[in-house]
Image (cartoon, rainbow, N blue to C red):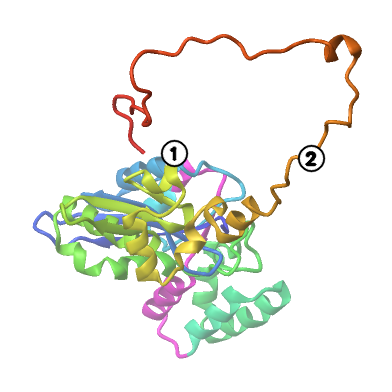
């Protein structure tokens, strides 16, 4: 994926309060791909550093990595301590909100947004000059932040299309109803939500739960993994997704392969009596069948199955 991670936080509304920290990115189809979740007592330096250290166990620090977030000071502190090599860009939407609340000038946020999203440096300065004309104090404020932090044209890393952290905010919106739950039910809500996005959870009549991943031909019952044709749980998921069962079976079970097995002809045995003349020393031998002793009793016509033998 594009190595751009959106990070955000949201307050929990349960009895014990706290915050949930999230990290997510976009897949190739510009859809949300969650990376990590963390529940902390409050949003501070210690909490964000703990979260980033957990994230770094899966995604290590790299010069090709970029983070996009709001301008919370604890995020900056955590990234400096855990991801010193990576790049960090400010969310354009949060930047606009700060400008709107701090500098109450009409169209000011619009020109700031155009300047932030400009691809060419010359275009950036054209739009930024409009900001300075409207409010010189706002222009000075943005200069102190640093152009490389909030603009596309001056950014030192790769932001691709990710100028805002709405990926993380959209994820928080999905989990909105679960924010009133205690931590364990919250985690279970997140788990079942992600399952509904990426795979299936099938519940059998006996009450057992099985996770099916049709893309990997896998089910936690392990029958799908080892037999290479769908188990009942995979069949249920495939029918729900309107996927043909033939598409999730190994090629060895296909009709074409079955036909190929019997493609060759079974030819009769040719007459080879005159094909190879026998040497005189062999032709003169009187060959008889070997002597064998027949076992007592009536010959058995059915094979005795071995202990524990099952098909």
| Residue visible at 61% across and 46% down in the picture | 63
Residue 86 on the magenta segment:
yes
Whether residue 213 sits left or right of residue 3 in the image: it is left
Position of the C terminus by quadrant: top left
Judge whether 172 appears above or below 214 on screen.
Answer: below
Question: Rounded to the nearest whole Å, what is the CA distance between mark 2 and mark 1?
Answer: 70 Å
Mark 2, residues whose alpha carbon is within 10 Å: few (<14), some, or many (≥20)?
A: few
| Residue visible at 89% across and 31% down in the picture | 275
Front-most of 193 and 124? 193
Q: Earlier in the sequence, mark 2 or mark 1?
A: 1
Q: Element at badge 1?
A: loop
| Residue visible at 55% across and 48% down in the picture | 86
Front-most of 33 and 111? 33
Residue at the far bottom: name it: 106
Q: Residue 201's quadrant in the figure?
A: bottom left
Task: Return the residue at label 2.
Answer: 270
Q: Is residue 73 visible?
A: no
Position of the N terminus by quadrant: bottom right
User: Where does the image place residue 52, in percent across and percent down from the top left?
Assistant: 40, 45
Q: Residue 193's quadrant in the figure?
A: bottom left
Q: Is residue 70 visible?
A: yes
Disc on res. 57 = 1
User: Where does the image place residue 74, in percent across and percent down from the top left?
Assistant: 36, 51
Whether residue 19 sits left or right of residue 167 in the image: it is left
Residue at the far left: name it: 15
Front-most of 189 and 139? 189
Residue range in magenta is 79-106
């Amino acid at each position: 994926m594009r190595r751009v991670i959106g990070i955000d936080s949201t307050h929990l509304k349960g009895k014990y309060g706290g915050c949930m920290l999230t990290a997510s990115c976009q897949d190739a189809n510009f859809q949300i791909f969650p990376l990590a979740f963390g529940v902390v007592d409050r949003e501070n330096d210690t909490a964000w550093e703990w979260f980033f250290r957990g994230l770094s166990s899966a995604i290590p620090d790299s010069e090709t990595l970029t983070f996009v977030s709001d301008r919370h000071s604890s995020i900056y502190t955590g990234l400096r301590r855990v991801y010193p090599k990576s790049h960090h860009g400010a969310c354009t939407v949060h930047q606009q909100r700060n400008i709107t609340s701090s500098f109450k000038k009409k169209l000011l946020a619009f020109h700031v947004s155009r300047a932030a999203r400009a691809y060419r440096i010359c275009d950036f300065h054209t739009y930024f000059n409009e900001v300075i004309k409207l409010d010189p104090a706002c222009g000075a404020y943005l200069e102190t932040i640093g152009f490389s932090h909030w603009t596309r044209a001056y950014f030192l890393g790769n932001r691709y299309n990710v100028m805002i952290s709405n990926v993380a905010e959209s994820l928080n919106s999905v989990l909105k109803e679960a924010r009133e739950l205690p931590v364990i039910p919250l985690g279970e809500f997140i788990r079942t939500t992600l399952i509904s996005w990426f795979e299936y959870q099938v519940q059998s009549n006996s009450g057992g739960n099985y996770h099916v991943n049709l893309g990997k031909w896998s089910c936690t019952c392990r029958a799908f993994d080892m037999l290479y044709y769908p188990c009942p749980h995979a069949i249920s998921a495939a029918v729900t997704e309107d996927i043909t069962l033939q598409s999730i079976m190994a090629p060895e079970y296909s009709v074409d392969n079955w036909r190929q097995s019997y493609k060759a002809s079974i030819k009769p045995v040719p007459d080879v009596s005159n094909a190879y003349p026998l040497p005189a020393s062999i032709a003169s031998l009187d060959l008889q069948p070997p002597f064998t002793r027949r076992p007592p009793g009536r010959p058995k016509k059915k094979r005795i199955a071995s202990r524990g033998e099952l098909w």
